[in-house]
């Protein structure tokens, strides 16, 4: 009995040492990045093996914040926030409308369009990248947010699919009861379905935020002037202008761009985890 | 039927004044197309028209400024006979996909199985393992990765600590490519969450019954876990393969947009981007995009074709 107890206890310890230790090993680079952002630039690689900055300096942050081309990170963050806000409105409105249509309404060609949507889910962006660029160039939309946000107002297959799945779990009796009470289709969408799908809308919002915040290819394609840069684009410029020793500032701004991602995750973890496990959203 | 479609495409519910005269069927169609209308418009303008345009451009020489010039199959010919960089990008991408995806899924499954216990710490571990996936797409992480693999970075410090030789990750094309593969494997967290959800849905009674019959851990793994998880695995495999084929950001940032060293990190998307946007070879880039689409379609078809030999569906009604 006593022996059995110790083996199960040591098994327990072994489990936590392996699983916990491996987790710490995986996250160590991120921890190293954060701590290094408080080291003096010249020290970062000289003292790469120690984590605690000595001397501790906060200087990298104001230095990095200055940005370049006369624009500070305040501008880049503001630009990104506008980008994110427009994408949020676009995705939430369009995806919920479309998902309601697919999940609840019977109309000619529904199966066909639903299949089309599932196919576009797997279509690589690169295939449409070049012609889209040509079209937006001809429209005179280059160096503006338009090519990045306008498509967002016409739905996104991942989120449509997620919302369709969610709406299908809502009992149809609710719709029928409302119809008997004289509600038309739009009212059913607006008054009944919309309030009930807020968890799925939250997942949509969070992932829209993440993808927009991290989006680099879009801004690289369409934004040329520093006054319009998003944070990801600004960070990328940091790297291109990488002067021999300004690692500190670059690390500091990298940390700054990660903060909103972490904070959002901390508060809405449940939606993120559920979104991925139920629909396979890539996070 | 066909007149109905015509009407529905024209109509939004706003111009359906004589509502009472419309049959229920027509009304349903109007509402349906009102709701999914945004998708159809978006699909036509941002996907369908670009795809058709891209197919046309693939057979032209086009620099955006002068009109496209029809050159037949020349772009495709050049790719496979006269462009070593193209073949290099193809090779690098295949190594990246077939090296990275199995490793990533393997890690995801192993860790998911470790976390599929009742321990109270599991929530915390799950979060910790998921974090790299969460932040993995960002520029910040690519910058971090570039720096931990530097000559004096912590990866080399770790290697020397273990008594191994330091690697010049940016000096050797193969090492540089593996650096990118490690970055994708590091982000196994989202696949792990999907596997974890799949594992949770396997009835415990199956394992209990197997234990009663004296099955070993590996027998249970092969006879219960793998078959029960196979639909999830199929889904993961397809999505990850497509995503891996399209990888752009890490290669772009880590090589500073060059694909260096010696085109060792010149992933397909990066080369396509360079041809199209940097060198303005829009026709050539479109042709590349179509070859990529074809390769992905073939790979997906192969995975689906093999699926009936290894994917197990619990109910007959499964997909």
Image (cartoon, coloured by chain):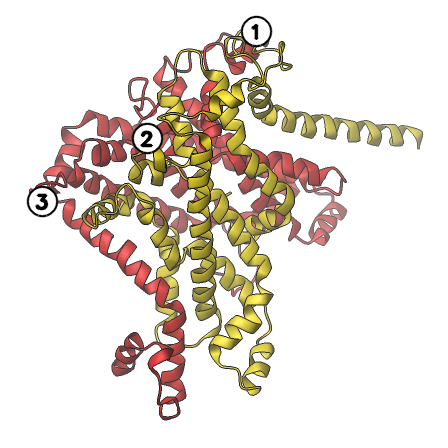
Chain colours: A yellow, B red
Decide if residue A96 is in sight here: yes
Question: Where residue A94 sits: x, y (%)?
Answer: 42, 61
Looking at marks 1 and 3 on the same chain, the residue that comes earlier in the sequence is marked by 3
Q: Quadrant of residue B265?
A: top left
Say which of A48 and A74 sits in front. A74
Q: Quadrant of residue B29?
A: bottom left
Q: Which mark is residue B68?
A: 3
Question: Where residue B88 sits: x, y (%)?
Answer: 26, 26
Circle 1 residues within 10 Å: few <14, some 14–19, many ≥20: few
The quadrant in which the N terminus of chain A is found is top right
Residue to which mark 2 is pinned: B267
Q: Give the letter of the chain under mark 1.
A: B
Q: Secondary structure at mark 2?
A: loop
Q: Residue at x 60, y 27 (%)?
A: A27
Looking at marks 1 and 2 on the same chain, the residue that comes earlier in the sequence is marked by 1
Q: Quadrant of residue B111?
A: top right
Q: Which mark is residue B163?
A: 1
Q: Give the letter of the chain under mark 2.
A: B
Q: Residue at x 55, y 38 (%)?
A: A261
Decide if residue B240 is in sight here: no
Question: Where residue A82 sits: x, y (%)?
Answer: 43, 46
């Amino acid at each position: 009995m006593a022996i059995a107890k110790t083996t199960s206890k040591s098994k327990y310890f072994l489990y936590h040492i392996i699983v916990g230790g491996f987790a710490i090993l995986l996250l160590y680079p991120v921890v190293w990045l954060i701590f290094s952002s408080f080291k003096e630039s010249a020290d970062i690689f000289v003292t790469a093996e120690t984590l605690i900055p000595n001397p501790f300096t906060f200087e990298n942050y104001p230095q990095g914040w200055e940005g370049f081309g006369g624009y500070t990170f305040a501008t880049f963050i503001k630009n990104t926030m506008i980008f994110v806000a427009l994408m949020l409105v676009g995705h939430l409105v369009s995806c919920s409308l479309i998902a309601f249509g697919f999940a609840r309404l019977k109309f000619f060609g529904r199966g066909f369009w639903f299949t089309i949507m599932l196919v576009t889910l797997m279509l690589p962006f690169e295939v449409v990248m070049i012609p889209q660029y040509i079209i937006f160039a001809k429209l005179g939309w280059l160096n503006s947010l338009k090519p990045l946000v306008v498509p967002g107002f016409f739905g996104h297959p991942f989120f449509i699919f997620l919302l369709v799945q969610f709406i299908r779990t809502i009992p149809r009796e609710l719709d029928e009861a409302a119809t008997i009470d004289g509600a038309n289709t739009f009212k059913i969408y607006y008054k009944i379905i919309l309030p009930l799908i807020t968890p799925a809308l939250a997942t949509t919002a969070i992932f829209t935020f993440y993808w927009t915040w991290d989006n680099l290819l879009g801004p690289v394609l369409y934004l040329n002037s520093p006054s319009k840069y998003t944070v990801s684009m600004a960070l990328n410029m940091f790297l291109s202008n990488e002067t021999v020793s300004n690692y500190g500032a670059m690390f500091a701004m990298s940390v700054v761009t990660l903060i909103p991602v972490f904070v959002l995750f901390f508060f809405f973890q449940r939606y993120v985890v559920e979104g991925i496990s139920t629909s396979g959203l890539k996070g | 039927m066909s007149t109905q479609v015509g009407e529905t495409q024209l109509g939004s519910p706003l111009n359906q004044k004589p509502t009472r005269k419309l049959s229920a069927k027509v009304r349903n169609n109007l509402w349906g197309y009102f709701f999914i209308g945004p998708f159809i418009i978006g699909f036509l303008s941002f996907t369908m028209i670009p795809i058709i345009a891209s197919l046309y451009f693939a057979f032209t020489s086009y620099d955006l400024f002068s009109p496209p010039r029809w050159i037949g199959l020349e772009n495709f010919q050049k790719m496979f006979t006269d462009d070593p960089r193209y073949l290099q990008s193809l090779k690098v991408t295949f190594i990246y996909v077939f090296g990275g995806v199995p490793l990533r899924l393997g890690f995801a499954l192993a860790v998911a199985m470790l976390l599929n216990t009742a321990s109270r710490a599991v929530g915390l571990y799950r979060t910790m393992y998921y974090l790299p996936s969460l932040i993995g797409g960002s520029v910040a992480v690519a910058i971090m990765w570039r720096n931990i693999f530097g000559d004096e970075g912590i990866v080399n410090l770790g290697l020397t600590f273990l008594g191994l030789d330091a690697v010049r990750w940016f000096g050797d094309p193969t090492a540089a490519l593996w650096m990118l593969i490690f970055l994708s494997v590091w982000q196994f967290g989202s696949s792990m969450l999907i596997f974890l959800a799949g594992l949770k849905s396997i009835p415990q009674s199956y394992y209990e019954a197997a234990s009663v019959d004296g099955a070993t851990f590996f027998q249970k793994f092969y006879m219960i876990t793998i078959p029960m998880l196979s639909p999830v695995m199929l889904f993961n495999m397809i999505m990850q393969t497509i995503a891996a084929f399209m990888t752009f950001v890490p290669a772009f940032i880590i090589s500073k947009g060059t694909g260096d060293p010696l085109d060792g990190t010149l992933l397909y998307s990066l080369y396509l981007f360079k041809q199209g946007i940097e060198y303005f070879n829009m026709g050539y880039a479109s042709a590349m995009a179509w070859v990529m689409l074809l390769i992905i379609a073939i790979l997906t078809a192969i995975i689906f074709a093999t699926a009936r030999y290894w994917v197990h569906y619990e109910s007959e009604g499964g997909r």
